[in-house]
Image: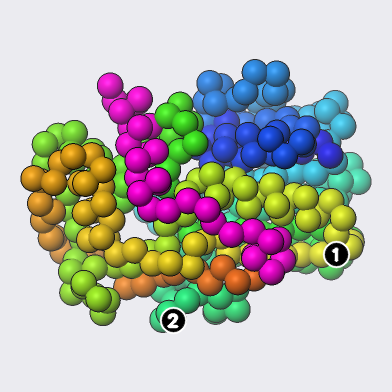
Amino acid sequence: MSWLVTGGAGYIGAHVVRALIEGGQQVVVYDDLSTGSRDRVPDGVPLVIGSVLDRTALDAALREHAITGVVHIAGKKQVGESVEKPAYYYRENVTGLQTLLDALGDAGIDRLVFSSSAAVYGMPDVTLVTEETPCKPLSPYGETKLVGEWLINASARAYGLRAASLRYFNVAGAASPELSDAGVFNLIPMVFERLEADEPPRIFGDDYATADGTCVRDYVHVQDIASAHLAAALRLADAEPGTSLTLNIGRGEGSSVREMVEHILKVTGREELLPVVTARRPGDPARVVASADRIREELGWSARHGVDEMIASAWGGWRHRHP
């Protein structure tokens, strides 16, 4: 099959592109380069510069490259920014998906892998989050991902779209330094930034109802995220029309913020910088850990990389970007 990967020049998208190629798939990258980089696109892989809001550019890319399926990763993903700019996030994430689905329908393309998020769950009060856990997103970002899933499910019912919506948990790591995350929005790069400034890492609250009082999260290596996309793409190749899967991508194991910080200090050799505890951040749930049973049953997929591998590879990427 020939897959168009929207957002394929971004951090997660570039890893997905490589996983698809290694899995024997033909790939075309479609990206507006607002946060992506040409340098992440492998040699020989076509790059189409365009927005998912641009129907003309989408139609041309689907037609000219004989696309048979789409992996839709393009979108805006910063929770805080979405609170400040809700209309912008709905336009980019929801209207962008609507435009893409219209283009797919008119082109007769019926296979879609959708990049969703654990943000759809909000603050679940459960030990393990299953796909049946009620969705109560806390931010416009999470809302746009949930609305996107609804739109995809309705399209599957209406005209036989074959789709998989993949709910990522906390993504970390890199397959190689040049593919690392350039943003400083998640725990690991935020700690790296503090270490680079010779400042102790911060822990936001240590009075949660967890074993050590700090938040617990399910961290997943980006290579595992990418391999899940490949597994979903292969599953859809032979799926019945109207198939619409919703799957968590997680390890099913929780790590507390304090445990993660201690791992980071050990990997980077900065154990002398003891973390400092500051006030809680608004809206941080105590525990969000995936149940990974369904994706194992549906796709035969499970995560292969552990926390130390995530941190070591992320640190290699950080040093590559901050020599």
Q: Residue at x 57, y 34 (%)?
A: 14
Give the tally of numbered discs. Answer: 2
Residue with the most extreme top position = 43
> Quadrant location of residue 6?
top right
Q: Which SS type dominates the magenta stretch? A: helix
Give x and y (percent) for residue 199.
11, 41
Q: Is residue 302 magenta?
A: yes
313 or 283, nearer to the observer = 313
Callout 2 crowding tier (Cα within 10 Å): few <14, some 14–19, many ≥20: few
Q: Amino acid at mark 2?
A: Val
Q: Is residue 97 left or right of residue 266?
A: right
Mark 1: which secondary structure?
loop
Foreground of the two, 315 or 122: 315
Determine which residue is flagged by label 2: 126
Residue drawn at x 86%, y 46% is 109
Q: Which residues are magenta?
A: 295-323
Q: Nearer the viewer, residue 320 or 81?
A: 320
Amino acid carrying mark 1 in the image = Gly
Q: Is residue 94 visible?
A: no
Residue 78, image x, y percentages: 43, 49
Residue 114: x %, y % from top left: 67, 53
Question: Residue 57, percent across and down?
Answer: 75, 30
Taking the image as shown, residue 209 lies to the left or right of residue 154, namely left
**Quadrant housing the C terminus:** top left
Badge 1: residue crowd in 10 Å (few <14, some 14–19, many ≥20): some
Magenta-span inclusion, residue 111: no
Q: Which residue is mark 1?
A: 242
**Which numbered marker is on residue 313?**
none
